[in-house]
Image (tube, coloured by chain):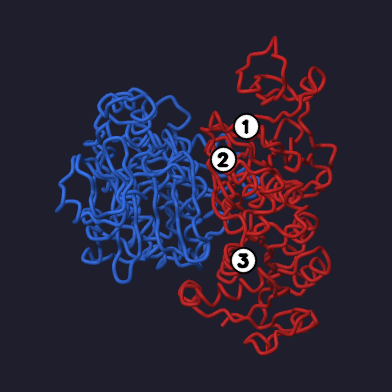
Chain colours: A red, B blue
Amino acid sequence: MKKIAILGFGIVGGGIAEVLEQNADQIEHQLGEKIEIGYILDRLDFKGTKYESKIVKDIQTILDDPEVALVAETMGGLHPAYEFSLSALQAGKSVVTSNKAVVAKYGATLLQTAKENGVRYLFEASVGGGIPIIRPLCDSLAGNKISSITGILNGTTNFILNEMESKGASFETALAAAQKNGYAEKDPTDDIEGYDAKRKICILAALAFGKMYPEEAVACEGITNLDLRDVEILSDIGAKIKLIGHAKKTDNRLIMYVRPCVCLADNPLASISGVYNGIMVEDNVLGQVMFYGKGAGRLPTASAVVSDILNILISPSKVDLISFQTGNKEELCKDKSGKHTFYIRMEQEPVGYSYRALNGAYLVDDISRNEIEEKWKPTAYYQVL
Amino acid sequence: MKKIAILGFGIVGGGIAEVLEQNADQIEHQLGEKIEIGYILDRLDFKGTKYESKIVKDIQTILDDPEVALVAETMGGLHPAYEFSLSALQAGKSVVTSNKAVVAKYGATLLQTAKENGVRYLFEASVGGGIPIIRPLCDSLAGNKISSITGILNGTTNFILNEMESKGASFETALAAAQKNGYAEKDPTDDIEGYDAKRKICILAALAFGKMYPEEAVACEGITNLDLRDVEILSDIGAKIKLIGHAKKTDNRLIMYVRPCVCLADNPLASISGVYNGIMVEDNVLGQVMFYGKGAGRLPTASAVVSDILNILISPSKVDLISFQTGNKEELCKDKSGKHTFYIRMEQEPVGYSYRALNGAYLVDDISRNEIEEKWKPTAYYQVL
């Protein structure tokens, strides 16, 4: 019997309990023994439920129990999630989390603390919900030189874009539908402004390139200004606008942004619809690899946490190939002068450039953001991936 | 310095040497030391190349060197690849391989031998080329109950189907194009008859469901009888015919087959074109997850072998959650009576069924193979996924 503790018994924390129960036989088969939830730290008392007897109010109770080998932090927010994780690691307990805010801000410190204490800090659930992405990136692609990561990292905005495209809905109507379906929160800012995707691309870039950059330094544009007209014009050629998180290694710098971009019909990211996520990784030997699945949701996210729990309990002292330092924001590049193909909605013809005319817009090759802004100040323009 | 040996210095074996060289700094960064190819077992002498001094002719030389911690078997064929792998494991050396024939036939024995000798046997490269699929399946989904695996597992046939669809080429013309491009061998039987895909679905099913079935017991239909007419009729509705390997757990049995199936436009497998592979895994908590990438090729396949090498050298005694027994073929089900939606090309209307009429064919709901055969003996019919 292995004893664990859960910090925060909300959506994900409760989901962990559910997955552990639902898959108990499979987990026992793999681990050779049962996993028991020893403690649940929460403000609520869960009176009358089977969890009532496990509820504790003081983290110290958990830290003081030598039988607890592992702590799952699913509290959300930075504080005290960070402090609790840190003290658990210092007390010689491995920590797993779904808390991307903590990973993005304190991941480097927590990984270092884990290492110093001979325990592990894993966060598969922090990116891509249940999609296995962090472990494959760190284990399977460990020996490869990753050149770029490009992903649909936020299911809420992908659902909204999908509604606009498939139903001709305006952004406002699509957002309301997402809220009605439980895919968007009452305050959807984090999703629709791209902040959630930004944290995730920061985490992926840290794993791939070794440095975690402060999220506020990353170029970020959400989907709130998206006009249905552009969605429709692109739809005529089977292309789609997606909110993309992107990180690409150049010589000394890292291009990193979250922005709406155009995926042409033959781009595998174009076919990722609804609340699904897709993460495309490119390296020097594999070429492109993509990971696809449900990017959010109670059970998928909990399942990713449980996979970390199981991996740690089976190999408590495995050396994880996960480490990164804090990066200097001067190394980040907003890619204003990089030449790409752009979708540009404007009336005048882009004379002097190679282009393809669409119904009211153009796909213009080999042009930079700076050039577009200087020359035309168009109604809307988006990079084509 | 870690010393390894390569058995068989052909396409994949040579690719391993190339990846180890190309990514030497990244690998050394991860491992903390260099990897050295100590021996290469091959019939050829590679005279005048930098590998000449490493060539040996007798496996015993490798087995006798206590410095060799790991052997990469990339010989192809069953014998002596199996015997060499077995004796390496017995000599206390971990073995990695890209050889799907050996894994499909002797995997259970080799895994058991590895366990008994405290070493590891890994075969990430045996399915999906460079796509991380085996490790995610075993590590990331370890605690989940997988219900089905559905994949485009063979790049050659996917390229051929793509040529037929996008260029209106006949099967013969498309095959010739695949051969010209180096995607199909001179004798393409293994690919076009589905045998290669069959081995791969056997391996994936063994990992997901715990039993390896003899490949000859699996229902298998290749793409040689595919008529361009069906490809065209389906193309009108954005649907595609793909060669699918499928394994699905039912109560006591396992449905397993390799067959051409129809992927409708909204199925993520429909958008997988050219020599790419896509593997969709479904389980009880994650829902659908898909892994996508280049399913074959020198460097992608070699890269998967190198990822196994690196993982073993970093954690030589990690307990792998990989094990399966030999399955009884009576447990396999060809799914002749299961009800699905089928694409059926025939003249008469499928009266009494819910259906959608296409241009010269029908999509008929809730019908089984047996029923179709008994009622209509149609020109062609394919299950819709």
> Which chain is mark 1 on?
A
> Which chain is mark 3 on?
A
Asked if disc 2 and disc 1 are in contact, CB closer than 8 Å, the reply is yes
The answer to whether residue B58 of the structure is visible from this angle is no
On residue A298, which mark appears?
3
Q: Residue at x 48, y 54 (%)?
A: B69
Q: What residue type is labelled 1?
A: Leu
- Place residue B248 in its image quadrant: bottom left
Crowding at label 3, few (<14), some or many (≥20) Cα neighbours within 10 Å? many
Residue placed under numbered mark 1 in the picture:
A385
Left or right relative to A237: residue B234: left
Secondary structure beneath label 2? helix
Q: What residue type is labelled 2?
A: Leu
On residue B270, which mark appears?
none
Q: Give the mark nearer the N terminus: 2 vs 3.
A: 2
Left or right relative to A294: residue A91: right
Q: Where B109 sits versus A63, above or below?
A: above
Residue placed under numbered mark 2 in the picture:
A269
Discs 2, 1: same chain: yes
Q: Which residue is drawn at 64% across and 58% down?
A: A320
Tell me how far mark 3 sits from mark 1, CA to CA: 31 Å
Q: Give the mark nearer the N terminus: 2 vs 1.
A: 2
Asked if disc 3 and disc 1 are in contact, CB closer than 8 Å, the reply is no
Discs 2, 3: same chain: yes
- Place residue A67 in its image quadrant: bottom right
Residue A268 position in % (x across, y down): 53, 39
> Which chain is mark 2 on?
A
Secondary structure beneath label 1? loop
Tell me how far mark 2 sits from mark 1, CA to CA: 10 Å
Secondary structure beneath label 3? helix
